[in-house]
Image (spheres, rainbow, N blue to C red):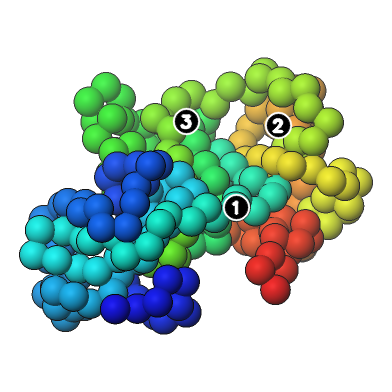
């Protein structure tokens, strides 16, 4: 049995339920696909150590059993790192959003909002839109397991971009990626110290319209550029998010 809190590279599993009130000795069921991954892909056996999380900030050491996992320690709280980062991302063509979500989750974003803009080409609606959102949530769970994140990234249903929404908080910074912006991302972040939440908006393959950018700026967003080159939309989210995290000290957390 692995001592509680031992730094051993064990498999990491996001549970379907909460760990609130859980105790050592509790048995928790796993989905069949989770057990298959642990036993067939990772070649783990009953009695091997695993780490589990509820995706809401609690994690615990456990052992793999024939019916699921057996908790070997009390759950511990894993604090979320500030600033929290939300990425509002125009839905790209095909299944490119899967890779976008996967990378953003590995970076540690707290939420992804897939949106439709004036120039968005992929425009699912009704049951198709719900199916895409559900697929993205599954991608986020798998990415959280890869990233060993105790905080599951939320994925919103697909919606139209609301360019008029205002959020009046002194501790929130909202950035919209725009190649023609006069402000660099470093300057924008430096001008807003001690922010607790950063939103990053990424347009579609054809870019946001001038009207959308103007409306967003009017609503309090800051148009920023990332260097002198133009990024593909499927890469821009990761690049700007990584820049925000580096500039705000997120990458120094835990050191």
Near mark 1 (Cα within 10 A), the count class, few <14, some 14-19 or many ≥20, is few
Question: Could you give the CA–CA distance between mark 1 and mark 2, rounded to whole angstroms?
Answer: 35 Å
**What residue is disc 1 on?**
79
Q: Left or right: 113 with respect to 10?
A: right
Tell me the CA gap for discs 3 and 1. 33 Å
- Residue 223 coordinates in the image, percent (x, y): 77, 40
Tell me which numbered mark, 3 or 2, is placed earlier along the sequence: 3
Residue located at (65% from left, 53% from top): 81
Between 85 and 128, the one nearer to me in the picture: 85
From what the image shows, is residue 63 above or below residue 134? below
Question: Image quadrant for the C terminus?
Answer: bottom right
Question: Which quadrant of the figure contains the N terminus?
Answer: bottom left
Labelled pair 3, 1 in contact (Cβ < 8 Å): no
Sequence-wise first label, 1 or 2: 1
Task: From this view, report whether residue 114 is shown above or below residue 234.
Answer: above
* Residue at the image position 27 percent from the left and 22 percent from the top: 126
Comparing labels 1 and 2, the label whose residue is closer to the camera: 1
Q: Residues within 10 Å of mark 2 (few under 14, many from 20)?
A: many
Question: Is residue 127 found left or right of 91 in the rendered image?
Answer: left
* Residue 81 in sight from this viewpoint: yes
Q: For mark 3, what is the residue?
A: 116
In which quarter of the view is residue 163 placed? top right
Q: Position of residue 70 (x, y in %)?
A: 23, 61
Residue 178 spot, x, y in % from top left: 71, 45
> Is residue 133 left or right of 36 when viewed as pictured?
right
Mark 3 or mark 1, earlier in chain = 1
In space, the residues marked 3 and 2 are separated at their CA atoms by: 14 Å
Asked whether the viewer can see residue 145, the reply is: no
The residue beneath circle 2 is 213
For numbered disc 3, what is the local secondary structure? Answer: strand
């Amino acid at each position: 049995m692995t001592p509680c809190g031992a730094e051993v590279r064990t498999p990491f599993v996001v549970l379907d339920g909460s760990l609130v009130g859980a105790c050592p000795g509790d048995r928790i069921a796993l989905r069949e696909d989770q057990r298959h991954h642990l036993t067939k892909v990772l070649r783990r056996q009953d009695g091997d150590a695993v780490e589990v999380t509820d995706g809401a900030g609690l994690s615990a050491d456990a052992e793999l059993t024939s019916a699921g996992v057996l908790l070997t320690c009390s759950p511990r709280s894993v604090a979320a790192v500030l600033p929290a980062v939300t990425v509002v991302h125009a839905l790209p063509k095909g299944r490119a959003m899967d890779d976008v979500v996967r990378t953003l989750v590995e970076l540690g974003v707290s939420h992804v909002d897939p949106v439709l803009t004036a120039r968005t080409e992929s425009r699912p609606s009704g049951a198709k839109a719900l199916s895409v959102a559900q697929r993205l949530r599954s991608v986020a769970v798998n990415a959280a397991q890869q990233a060993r994140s105790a905080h599951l990234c939320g994925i919103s249903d697909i919606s139209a971009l609301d360019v008029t929404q205002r959020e009046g908080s002194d501790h929130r910074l909202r950035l919209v990626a725009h190649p023609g912006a006069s402000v660099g991302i470093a300057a924008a972040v430096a001008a807003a110290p001690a922010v607790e939440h950063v939103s990053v908006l990424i347009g579609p393959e054809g870019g946001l319209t001038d009207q959308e950018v103007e409306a967003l700026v009017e609503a309090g967003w800051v148009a920023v550029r990332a260097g002198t080159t133009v990024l593909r939309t499927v890469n821009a989210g990761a690049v700007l998010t990584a820049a925000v995290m580096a500039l705000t000290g997120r990458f120094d957390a835990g050191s």
